[in-house]
Image (cartoon, grey):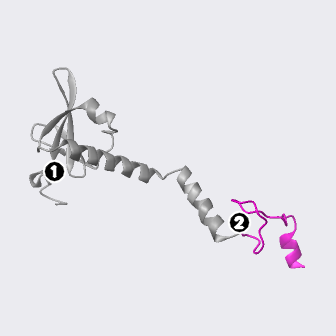
Amino acid sequence: MELKKRNEGKDPKRTCLLCHEIIVGRSDKKFCDDYCRTRYNYNKAKETPALYTQIYDQLKLNRKLLRHFNRGGIVHVRKELLTQKGFNPHFFTHYWKNSKGDVFLFCFEYGFLKKVENGCEKYILILWQKYMSPSVGIV
C-alpha cells in the first residue's frame, strides 16, 4: 500500500534528458545510461563556462602577450598593439608600487604600466625582480 502512495501522480513514462528514450529502473533515474549522463553534463558545462575558467584564460592570454612583447627587460609597447591581440589590462594577479609612486600591474611574473607619451598611450613592460618582493610576508 505504501509503494502505491509513493508512485501515485508520477509519470510512468519517464524519458532520458538527453536522448528521450524511456527509462527503466529506479524512480529517480534521469538518464537511460552512463553515456547519456556524461554527454548531458558535458554539454551543460560547455554551454556556460565557469567564471574562474574565463578569468584564468584571460590571465594566461595576458601573460602570453606580455612575455611575447617583453624580450628586453624593459620595453615600451603601444596600447592598441596589445589590445588588438586580446590583452585586457583589467585582469592581473598582483601589483607593485615603485619609489616614484607608479603602480605596475602584473600577470604572474610579467608587469605593465600604462603611460601617455607624446599623446600616445603605451605600456611599459617589465619582468618581476627579487627586489620587488615585500620585506615581510611572501617572498
Question: Label 1 crowding class (10 Å Cα cut-off): few <14, some 14-19, many 20+?
Answer: some
**Where residue 116 sits: x, y (%)?**
19, 26
Mark number, residue 92: none
Q: Which residue is mark 1?
A: 128
The disc labelled 2 sits on which kind of residue? Answer: Lys
**Rendered-image quadrant of the C terminus:** bottom left
> Where, by quadrant of the figure, is residue 105 drawn?
top left
Which quadrant holds the N terminus?
bottom right
Q: Earlier in the sequence, mark 2 or mark 1?
A: 2
Q: Which residue does the image show at 75% across and 74% down from the upper left?
A: 26
Residue at position x 71%, y 66% in the image = 30
Is 49 placed left or right of 35 in the picture?
left
Residue that extends furthest to the bottom in the rendered view of this protein: 1
Q: CA distance from mark 2 to mark 1?
A: 52 Å
Residue range of the region highlighted in magenta in the rendering: 1-29
Residue 118 vertical placement versus 54 (above, below): above
Q: Would residue 13 be counted in the magenta stretch?
A: yes
Residue where numbered disc 2 is placed: 30
Neighbour tally class for label 2: few under 14, some 14-19, many 20 plus, Cα within 10 Å: some
**Residue furthest toward the right?**
1
The secondary element bearing badge 1 is classed as: loop
- Amino acid at pointer 1: Trp
Q: How many marks?
A: 2
Residue 30 visible in the snapshot = yes
- Provide residue 103's location: percent of width, then percent of height: 19, 40
Query: What type of secondary structure mainly makes up the magenta span?
Result: loop
